[in-house]
Image (spheres, rainbow, N blue to C red):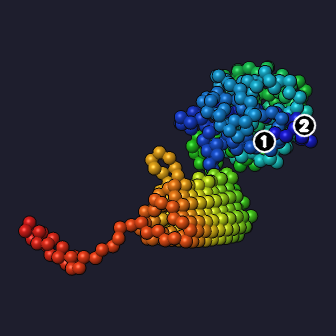
């Protein structure tokens, strides 16, 4: 959080104490994930775009889990506990003790509203002396609070449950986001009452209280896509779909070919280079970075993996757990890699598991190469030198080192290091028994006849 900021000083209070009853989950609502990231982190990242001096999260339900998650993203986040969920206005007051004399803008965000853009965040603090509410237009305003406007001025916000039939017709709605001078907001919050349909202290009563004191109240607007609030699993799926639609469009706009975009699922942090081709049904978990001119073939699953230029992966490959693929490498079908460092031009064309391993440049792993990295207690490393050739169906029992230019014979179980340039044969020797197959068959046929 940089203090170097041309704008007014800002403090963010993110509300995340609610039960999220409609999720029907043992997990707190704000920790449900969109594109592999908890919705709380989406909201916190939106907050961070203003480089705030202070950032606070109000927790209540599953307070510890929510606080832990918030701290994992922003270690200096301030946590306030709201023991009883008495409403959004009450929730903001939990931060009163340390923020009521903050000399700057206070911005209230909701943990269940993940998609606010940086541009919208900036609009909120354009008029620092005013109370600013973020609104949006919709043809189905449903349960949203309604903004009662008089031209530019915001007269009040009416919750759907308290609205008159006329007010319910209003299609200008409250996103929940509110900004204004911290001192004004906390002064007004102390005047809230819970005399309303839900018996709660509504943050939304603030604009009317502000006007009564002669404080200017206004609304700024954004697209409904940004203010999408998540209350149940249907909303969660809609948020996921909205995220994916945007991510696909961005990927294509930036120069990636998606052959069937609607079947590709991105993570919130996927990075793609130019002229990347992604075939149908590819899934990106968190932490994937793909350089230029890479082809990801159908049904591949990637997570925590970096891929250098000119690589081809899949179909049906799974790369994960801190894997690095160097330039020009080739990874074919039914290959899994975990924590693998796969060298330039190296190949694993089919049916291979590479875990906790280093593979040198131009090495070739035959079909069925398996690094046996786990002994049931610990993980061990396999090192394969440059240009090594691992014969088909080799089991590499780690820890083990295969030297540069070495060979392992097909079907070997390699338990000892192989020096550079050597050939390791570690399998039973073949013996041919003349005529024995024919004799065996005769005997078996005889046994069968005796039984019948
Ligand atoms: C709220 C707004 C409504 C707006 C809608 C937009 C109020 C009174 N209403 O309604 O005008 O259209 O958001 O999505 O503000 N929370 C707490 N403590 C509480 C209550 C809520 O931390 O005591 C948190 C929740 O965890 C959630 C957020 O505040 O993150 C919003 O609460 P929620 O109950 O979902 O408000 P809505 O009924 O959706
Ligand atoms: Ca809500």
Seen as rendered, the residue at the extreme bottom is 435
Q: Is residue 251 above or below residue 71?
A: below
The numbered mark at residue 48 is 1
Q: Position of residue 79 (x, y in %)?
A: 71, 29
Identify the image quadrant of residue 111.
Answer: top right
State whether residue 358 appears in this view.
Answer: yes
Comparing 310 with 240, the one in front is: 310
- Chain-order first, disc 2 or disc 1: 2
Q: Is residue 434 left or right of residue 329?
A: left
Q: Is residue 6 above or below residue 90?
A: below
Q: Is residue 274 above or below residue 268?
A: below
Q: Is residue 313 left or right of residue 131?
A: left
Comparing 285 with 413, the one in front is: 413
Q: Residue at x 88, y 35 (%)?
A: 9
Residue under numbered circle 2: 8
Q: Secondary structure at mark 1?
A: helix
Identify the image quadrant of residue 76.
Answer: top right
Quadrant containing the C terminus in the rendered view: bottom left
State whether residue 280 appears in this view.
Answer: no
Q: Residue at x 52, y 52 (%)?
A: 380
Q: Residue at x 62, y 39 (%)?
A: 31
Quadrant containing the N terminus in the rendered view: top right
Comparing 418 with 112, the one in front is: 418
The total number of labels drawn is 2
Measure the alpha-carbon separation of dots 2 and 1.
Answer: 14 Å
Packing grade of label 2 (10 A; few <14, some 14-19, many >=20) is some
Packing grade of label 1 (10 A; few <14, some 14-19, many >=20) is some
């Amino acid at each position: 959080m940089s203090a170097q900021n041309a704008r007014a000083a800002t403090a963010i209070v993110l509300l995340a104490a609610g039960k999220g009853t409609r999720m029907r989950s043992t997990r707190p609502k704000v920790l449900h994930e969109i594109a592999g990231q908890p919705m709380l982190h989406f909201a916190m990242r939106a907050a961070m775009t203003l480089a705030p001096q202070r950032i606070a999260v109000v927790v209540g339900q599953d307070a510890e889990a929510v606080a832990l998650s918030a701290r994992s993203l922003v270690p200096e986040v301030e946590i306030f506990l709201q023991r009883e969920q008495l409403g959004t206005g009450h929730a903001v007051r939990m931060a009163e003790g340390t923020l009521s004399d903050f000399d700057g803008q206070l911005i209230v965000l909701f943990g269940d509203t993940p998609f606010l853009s940086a541009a919208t965040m900036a609009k909120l603090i354009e008029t620092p002396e005013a109370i600013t509410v973020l609104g949006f237009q919709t043809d189905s305003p449903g349960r949203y609070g309604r903004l009662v406007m008089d031209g530019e001025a915001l007269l009040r916000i009416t919750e759907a449950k308290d609205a008159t039939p006329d007010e319910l017709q209003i299609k200008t709605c409250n996103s929940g986001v509110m900004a204004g001078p911290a001192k004004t907001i906390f002064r007004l919050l102390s005047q809230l009452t819970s005399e309303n349909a839900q018996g709660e202290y509504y943050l939304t009563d603030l604009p009317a209280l502000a006007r009564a004191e002669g404080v200017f109240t206004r609304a700024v607007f954004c697209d409904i896509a940004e203010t999408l609030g998540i209350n149940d699993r249907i909303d969660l799926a809609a948020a996921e779909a909205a995220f994916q639609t945007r991510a696909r469009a961005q990927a294509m706009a930036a120069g990636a070919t998606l052959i069937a975009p609607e079947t590709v699922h991105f993570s919130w942090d996927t990075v793609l280079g130019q002229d990347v081709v992604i075939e149908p049904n590819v899934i990106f978990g968190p932490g994937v970075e793909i350089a230029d001119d890479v082809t990801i073939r159908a049904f591949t699953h990637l997570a925590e993996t970096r891929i250098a230029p000119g690589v081809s992966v899949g179909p049906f490959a799974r790369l994960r757990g801190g894997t690095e693929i160097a330039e020009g490498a080739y990874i074919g079908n039914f290959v899994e890699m975990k924590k693998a460092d796969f060298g330039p031009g190296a190949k694993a064309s089919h049916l291979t598991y590479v875990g906790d391993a280093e593979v040198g440049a131009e090495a070739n792993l035959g079909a069925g190469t398996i690094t046996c990295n786990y002994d049931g207690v610990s993980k061990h490393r396999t090192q394969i030198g440059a240009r090594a050739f691992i014969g088909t169906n080799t089991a590499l029992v780690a820890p083990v080192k295969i030297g540069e230019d070495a060979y392992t014979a097909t079907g070997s179980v390699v338990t000892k290091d192989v020096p550079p340039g050597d050939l390791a044969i570690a399998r039973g020797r073949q013996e041919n028994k003349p005529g024995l197959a024919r004799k065996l068959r005769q005997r078996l046929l005889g046994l069968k006849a005796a039984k019948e």
